[in-house]
Image: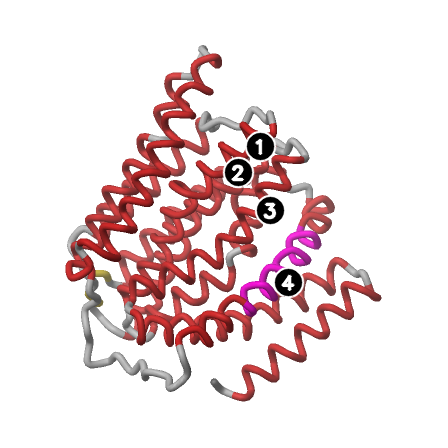
Amino acid sequence: MNVLIWIAAAVLTAWSIAVHLWVQSPVMQFFVSSAAVIPLAAIMGRATEAIAARSGERLGGLLSATFGNAVELIIGIFSLKDGLIPLVKSSITGSIISNLLFVLGLSFFVGGLRHPIQKFNVRVARSHGSMLMLGIGVAFVVPTAFAYGQPHISPVLSYGAAAVSLAVYLLGLYFSLFTHRELFQAIQHEEDDAQVSSRPVLVHVALLAASTVLVSLESDWLVGSVRSIADQLGWSEVFIGVVVVAIIGNAAEHASAVWMAWKNRMDLSLEIAVGSTLQVAMFIAPVLFFIGALMGVPFTFAFTWPEVVSMMAAVLLVVVLVMDGESNWLEGAMAFGAYVVLAAGFYSLPG
């Protein structure tokens, strides 16, 4: 890896730690932590690329998404412990629409500027589309619709939706990684310049894990400073959870997907963006539901109607865009534009 990236990551991370411990200025913390995330994101992206070169795009993207979402799971558990159920749901909503529209849209757009038409495995796209319709279109919409005016139904439906989502997600991993692995091979391009590192895969996994831990710390400080700034600007908690926290909290993961698209590795970019969405909807959310049940916290899959409509709109648009196995910068602009409209809608909600 470029020595300058390592130096920048070390200097900016040390600077942000110093600001957090001694300066304690929300404004300075925001800008320093934002700067620190950039080289750390580059390290995560290159570690993910090295893993994918040795183990395949599917596993590389899955590891990147898993390390990125581990932070969300931990934050969600502590939020449930404090009874912050609306914040947990808004964070889930934000992760889904930001990954599907903001990240994938930006990936399509940035990649399309360099490569007019980018191709990816259409079987993977169709599989992801089907899983999205189940994990969001059924598991979230049905409990919300049936619980409308009948809140006593929501816990029962949520148990079924959480169990089915978790089971199908695990079956999907087994399907793509073992029984039908050959169907999920990445498309090779002349532009692919990924070199197989001489280091063992475990070294890159450890590097990915370490950079994820540092990014999680930076993201935590960043989100804390954003909340202080947002209070001064009068932003609502829903807008903060759905838009601001979702983008900043997953900044490194987002950067990895865009970087892979720029290098014309769309299978890996798609796996990071959409795979992360599936993991949030079909693994993180069910796990948080069952943990909430053990804690005695009434966390269900009944979301607010703006959240449900936003998630379904994102799913339907992405399913249409990826079904042909190709992408271009205009499709990216459409997805990103849809995200801007949804973000404006959440911004207009009262605090």
Q: Evaluate if marks 2 and 4 touch, with contact meaning CB atoms under 8 Å apart.
A: no
Lateral position of residue 331 relative to residue 212, left or right: left
Give me the residue at 73% from left, 49% from top.
228
The residue at which mark 4 appears reads as 218
Give me the residue at 81% from left, 61% from top.
24
| Mark 4 vs 3, N-terminal side | 3
Q: Give the numbered dot on residue 86.
A: 1
x, y percent for residue 239: 57, 41
Lateral position of residue 186 relative to residue 165, left or right: left
Overall secondary structure of the magenta section: helix
Residue type indicated by callout 2 = Ser
Indicate the secondary structure of the residue bearing disc 4. Answer: helix
Residue type indicated by callout 4 = Glu
| Mark 3 vs 2, N-terminal side | 3
Distance in Å between CA atoms under marks 4 and 3:
14 Å
Q: Evaluate if marks 3 and 1 touch, with contact meaning CB atoms under 8 Å apart.
A: no
Q: Evaluate if marks 1 and 2 touch, with contact meaning CB atoms under 8 Å apart.
A: yes
Residue 37 magenta-highlighted: no
The residue at which mark 3 appears reads as 75
Distance in Å between CA atoms under marks 3 and 1:
13 Å
Which segment is the magenta one?
210-226
Q: Give the numbered dot on residue 16.
A: none
Indicate the secondary structure of the residue bearing disc 3. Answer: helix
